[in-house]
Amino acid sequence: MSLRPLIVGNWKMNGTRASLSEARAIDRAAQRLAWADVALAPPFTLLYPVHAEVEHIRVGAQDLSTEECGAFTGEVSASMLADAGAQFVIIGHSERRSRHGEDDAALVAKCGRAVDAGLSVILCVGEPLDVRDAAEAEPYVLAQLDAVLPDMAATGPEIGEVVTVAYEPVWAIGTGRSASAPEISAMHRVIRDLLVRRYGEAGGRSVRILYGGSVNGTNAREILALPEVNGALVGGASLTSQSFMSIVLAAGADDAG
Ligand code: 13P
């Protein structure tokens, strides 16, 4: 698959203005890369500061409100994210689903708000361990994804410019135990089939499917070399430019053979 790899750092609830030096270092390093797109999703408080500091990487948010404006204390809307410099937003991360009770209806609403505001979306899906152990992972993940994939107007932008999918098995997030190469390949293949069913040829050709879950500088090369994998969504290892760029460089190592 000849999709340009996308490596996204999800800083989760980490980072203060002191972390801007890491964002700057990532941006400088990304400037020299020809083989990958690089993006950061800092916490809301750093969205505009990171946006103001970088030129060569994309900046996005980790979540958004289902609402557009009004009396929703603590919420941040899609248009506010765009105003702060966000180009994309992560939707449906397992930490949001499990800790904040986000269900399919909320995720559909968020996705609609994001697309209407001109943001692209990274839709996260992934099964918990008991579902994998019960050999139910594929139908579980496909149902999660099918519920939230937006319907696109035939005349609008190409689906891959709007939607990226991130497969993040819950049991691999922050555990140091990434999914195995065969597990990742098999899941990405069935996700690709669903994208083709939903969007036709453009779903096969243009939508990137990222893997996330304990990606680090040691395992990135094997994971990113899989033909079904179009990039990575990285948590802990994205917090310093050194560890994050070792993953980005691994995407290029594959290209170089
Ligand atoms: P880790 O890379 O820390 O496992 O986190 C993955 C993740 O949840 C990225 O969104």
Image: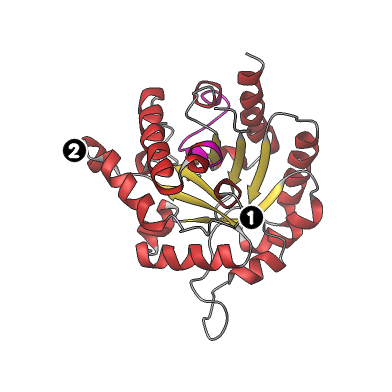
183 or 119, nearer to the observer: 119
Q: Does residue 101 appear in the picture of this structure?
A: no
Residue under the point 44% across and 33% down: 176
93 or 174, nearer to the observer: 93
Which image quadrant is residue 245 in? top right
Which element type, helix, strand or loop, lies under badge 2?
A: loop
Vertical placement of residue 33 versus 88, above or below: above
Give residue 60's mark: 1
Which element type, helix, strand or loop, lies under badge 1?
A: strand
Tell whether label 2 touches label 1 (CB within 8 Å).
no
Q: Does residue 183 appear in the picture of this structure?
A: yes
- Residue type beneath disc 1: Gly
Residue placed farthest to the front in the image? Answer: 155
Please rate how many residues cluster around mark 1, counting C-alpha atoms within 10 Å: few if below 14, some from 14 to 19, many from 20.
many
Q: Is tag 1's residue or tag 2's residue first in the polypeptide sequence?
A: 1
80 or 228, nearer to the observer: 228
Vertical placement of residue 80 versus 44, above or below: below
Please rate how many residues cluster around mark 2, counting C-alpha atoms within 10 Å: few if below 14, some from 14 to 19, many from 20.
few
Does the segment drawn in magenta span residue 88? Answer: no
Residue under the point 73% across and 52% down: 18
Q: Is residue 44 left or right of residue 23?
A: left
Q: Quadrant of the C terminus?
A: top right
x and y percentages locating residue 184 in the rendered image: 40, 30
x and y percentages locating residue 169 in the rendered image: 38, 40
Vertical placement of residue 232 versus 148, above or below: above
Q: Which residues are magenta?
A: 205-220
Q: Is residue 162 left or right of residue 25?
A: left
Does the segment drawn in magenta span residue 218? Answer: yes
Pointer 2: what residue?
A: 134
- Tell whether circle 2 marks a residue whose Cβ is less than 8 angstroms from ligand 1: no
